Amino acid sequence: MPDPSDEAWIDRFAELAGLPQDVRDMLHRRSRRASLPAGAHVFRPGQPAEAMLLLLSGSVRVQQVSDSGREIFLYRVQAGESCVLTTACMLADEDYSAEGIAETAVQAVVIPRAGFDELVGRSAIFRSFIFRAYGRRIADLFGLIDAIVFQRMDVRLAQRLLDMESGGVIVATHQAVAVELGTAREVVSRTLAEFHRRGWVETARGEIRILDRQGLRRMASSVT
């Protein structure tokens, strides 16, 4: 398990590997390690952003929850990445507008606001790391908006199933898949029923089994 008491963890983040030694020392001094169990809230709407998070292991799901309780998946933070919503909130001095949930047990490096501000002001490499990650995630979010607005649900669901499957099986409820796609569970269930009719999938409680991967690929590549 990587340990921020050893500066080698910095090299897990490729864009930070070129930091000069004095800045590496500062980052090392200013950071601490945090551990969270699966299912824990990393942050919640309305909570102030007080520290930057760099994931060493695990996965954090960032999602928006409407007043009615509907969940819309925004993005995941994986090992070797930072949470750009946290970065944006810290730069703008705004509270969180979405929630982050640990999908697995998480090990992370935490950089409190004072250290974050100092590093942003002192290091061009650190600033580049921050804004490159921010730019990539913004592009991802525009892609998500495009998919929700312009792509057919059957096309999006076929692609998501192919992305999520492991050994031909997706271990997820219809609700969990709906959250990934930013739609209602009933829409996913109805579309899966059509996929089942075509012989592409088989569903059971908490599980979707792919029977015809080529059929799903043809659907996923359909022009919408």
Image: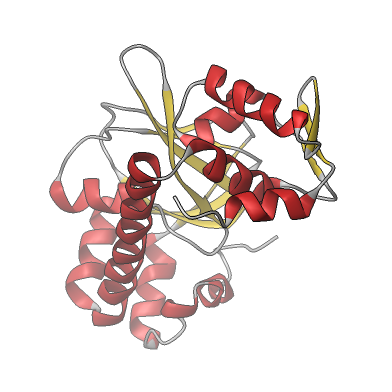
Q: Residue at x 62, y 49 (%)?
A: 219
- Report the colour scheme: secondary structure
Does residue 101 appear to the left or right of 37 in the view shown?
left
Q: Residue at x 76, y 30 (%)?
A: 196
Residue 50 spot, x, y in % from top left? 29, 43
Towards the viewer: 222 or 141 = 222
**Residue 192 sits in which quadrant?**
top right
Quick one: which residue is furthest to the left in this view? 92
Q: Considering only vertical position in the picture, is 100 above or below 58?
A: above
Q: Residue at x 27, y 68 (%)?
A: 131
Q: Considering only vertical position in the picture, is 159 above or below 188?
A: below
Residue 28 spot, x, y in % from top left? 44, 68
**Residue 46 sits in which quadrant?**
top left
Residue 19 spot, x, y in % from top left? 38, 84
Q: Is residue 101 visible?
A: no
Does residue 118 appear to the left or right of 198 in the view shown?
left
Q: Considering only vertical position in the picture, is 61 above or below 138?
A: above
Residue 45 spot, x, y in % from top left? 31, 27
Q: Considering only vertical position in the picture, is 187 above or below 111?
A: above
Q: Is residue 200 visible?
A: yes
